[in-house]
Amino acid sequence: MTEGVIEGAEIECPLHGARYCLKTGKVRAVPAICSIRVYPVHVVGNDVLIELPV
């Protein structure tokens, strides 16, 4: 998804064109049928911090 196109609160997969909600990871457009994982993100100064599960 690092190459995905973001529009509003959705991201489009560059490989198959499926769309996902950036906030929940839920599928918004086929061909995907499974949600993707999302992680809380915080911007602190010039740093982007991603909360990963332990």
Image (cartoon, grey):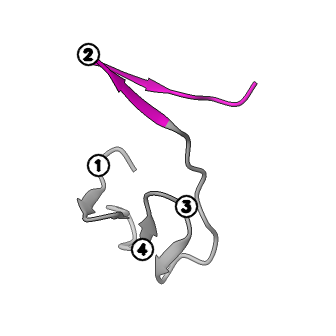
**Residue pushed farthest right?**
54
Residue drawn at x 37%, y 63% as measured from the top left:
13
Q: Is the Cβ of the residue at disc 3 closer than 8 Å to that at disc 1?
A: no
Mark 3 or mark 2, earlier in chain? 3
| Residue 18: assigned label | 4
Q: Is the Cβ of the residue at disc 3 closer than 8 Å to that at disc 2?
A: no
Residue drawn at x 57%, y 28% as measured from the top left:
51
- The one nearer the camera, 34 or 41, is 41
Residue behind mark 2:
45
Mark 1 or mark 4, earlier in chain? 1
Residue behind mark 1:
3
Cα distance in 3D space between marks 2 and 1: 24 Å
- The one nearer the camera, 23 or 32, is 23
Q: Secondary structure at mark 4?
A: loop
| Residue 24: assigned label | 3
Disc 2 residue type? Gly
Quarter residue 35 falls in: bottom right
The residue stretch that appears in magenta: 41-54
